[in-house]
Image: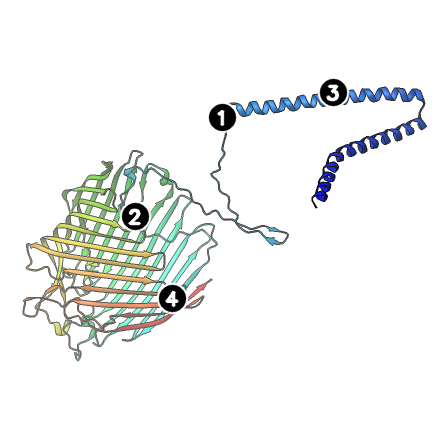
Amino acid sequence: MKTLLKYIFTIVIVCFCTEPIIAQKKHKSKAITTKSIAKKKQKGSTSKKNSVKKGKKGKTQQVEKFDEAANLNTLLKNASLNVNTSKADSIPEKVVTIMSAFKPQLKNVAKIDFVNASAQNDTTSLLLNYQVPSQNLSFQYKPISLIPRAYKIDSLQNFKNNGNVKIGLGNYFHHYIDLNFNAKDINNNTHSFNINNEAIAGLHHLQTVRNVGFNCIGDIYLNEDNHLATQLFYNQSQRYRYGLVADTSNVPASNFKQNYYHTGIALGWLNFSTQHHLIQYHPTLKLEHFEGQAGSTNNWLYLKNPMYIQTKHDLRFDFDLSYSLNQYNPKGYNHQTNYELRFDPTVEFNKLNSIVKLGVSPTIENGRFNLYPTVEYKKKLTDTNYLLIAGWHTHVMNNQYTSLVQINPWIISPSKMEMTSQEQKFVEIQINAGKRLDYGFKFSLNDYKNLPLFNKLMGTNRANYGLFYQTLFETKASTIELEAHLRYQFSDKLLIENKLKYIQFNALQDNAKPWGVLPLELNSSLSWKPNDKWIIDGGVNYWTGATLLNESGKPYDLKNSFVLNAGFSYKMAPKWKAWVKGENLLDKPYERWADYPSLGVQLIAGIVYSFTK
């Protein structure tokens, strides 16, 4: 066995050693065979002389091939040398990175071979930091005077005449009709018309109220830069004094009439070109006529021209000018005319990251000259959402028969009309708790002159003429007042508003009590739009009773009142809506003015039809 293995090992070694020699011989034999075949072909086609020349030429080509190979080797060596040299260089390479601030986003997905490409949205966001000057963190808001103006419609919009009719019926023979119509003529003048009629009858045969009104608001287009805002209105209210009158009384109803007729017109000039001018001004003119109890009338003229100059150095100069004229004609008394001419120059500037407003108000009231100070300070507290406001103002009210009736509709025409002034020193805090919630508080000390109060008129035949209230002007009164407000809004879906007012009288010169003034008032309202078809609204009113005289001539306080109201509307079709409204839902009659009780639960429902011409 060992001998056999030795033979096998010897054969493998011999084969391994002889294999390269055999391969080299085969290669040489193939080369010789190829050369012989080539020479035979050359001899068959050319002569010996040509074959010699070709042999020489072949040698030359072989030399050239060797030279090209040498050059190629040289180039490769040089190239490798250059590469090694560049890698060994110590100077760093300069890299320029180009970044684009624009981030494209595929909006409309293109179709490739009728297959939708997948959209790639950029989910990253850019963080931008801004340096805002501290003086620009808060700005003063100065409300301008209210002027009648129409809804301004974009000239590019295709305006159509449209309107709606609202009709409702309820208990206590309550009916309601309201018609609205908006139109635009060929001269680009916009007009809005409103006509309404409402009537309700209570349990008492004299507890009846009828109201008729007409209101027209227009925007007269003079040219591109000048518009004339107009308003024309007429209101009529018919009611009867049912206080302390028996329901079985046979006295004619004409003895208890307490009707009012109110007519007015207002004009306001809007100059849009002044937006780019240094001086801004918007004059307004109002004329009103009022007829009240027993034919007493009141004519009122009011002119106001707010003007201001805004400079580039955070300075503002105000030059408001106003004039009011009230002509009061009471039945059976001397006619009276009250006028006020007032000029309000003030300067407003930023100082120490605060807004300061200083000025004086020279005023002429029925020939008497008065100079009232104007001081106001605003500052946004650091790192908070609190805005602190402190000020000292004096307001003058040129009282009208119209304004007194709006407070108490049961008054007899006053024998004398006084002008009221209010000197107010206040501190206010406004808090912005976010995009949706803001609230604030205001504390003030007030000094009044000729403050109107209301109390029962004693010594009259109430069985035949009903209960009258009289207007008493308090010569001097000082008060402490607290006001608060809270507002929450979520888009256009939900709106909640709350207002509170508390007043405390510290001193009275003529009267023993602040007759007819409510010590505490709380008003809340809610508007909720859950979807495109439903709108729900509601309100809560609470107040503490005012102090009045009883039949024995002694003061007493009326009961506190809590009134709950609610309503909703539902869109049945594009042009039709159904609505329901309820007042005093707790069914607790209250008395804002003594011996004039309100009704119980009042429910009314109806429809609204919208049309387009």
Marks 2,1: beta carbons within 8 A: no
Please say whether residue 104 is visible from this viewpoint.
yes
Q: Nearer the viewer, residue 135 or 311?
A: 135
The residue that mark 2 highlights is 284
Compared to residue 234, the image places residue 126 above or below, namely above
Residue 373 x/y as whole percent: 16, 41
Residue 309 x/y as whole percent: 29, 37
Residues at marks 1 and 3, CA–CA distance in whole angstroms: 39 Å
Q: Which of disc 2 and disc 4 is earlier in sequence?
A: 2
What is the secondary structure assignment of the residue under circle 1?
loop
What's the residue type where badge 1 is placed? Pro
Q: Which of disc 3 and disc 4 is earlier in sequence?
A: 3
Please say whether residue 294 is visible from this viewpoint.
no
Given this view, does label 4 or label 2 mark the residue nearer the observer? 4
Residues at marks 2 and 1, CA–CA distance in whole angstroms: 76 Å
Residue 459 x/y as whole percent: 7, 68
Compared to residue 311, the image places residue 443 above or below, namely below
The residue that mark 4 highlights is 534
The label on residue 67 is 3
What's the residue type where badge 2 is placed? Thr
Residue 546 x/y as whole percent: 13, 63
Given this view, does label 3 or label 2 mark the residue nearer the observer? 3
Mark 4: give few (<14), some (14-19) or many (20+) Cα within 10 Å. Answer: some
Q: Which of disc 4 and disc 1 is earlier in sequence?
A: 1
Residues at marks 1 and 4, CA–CA distance in whole angstroms: 72 Å
Marks 4,3: beta carbons within 8 A: no
Q: Which of disc 1 and disc 2 is earlier in sequence?
A: 1
The residue located at (16%, 54%) in the rendering is 482
The residue that mark 1 highlights is 92
The residue located at (39%, 68%) in the rendering is 570
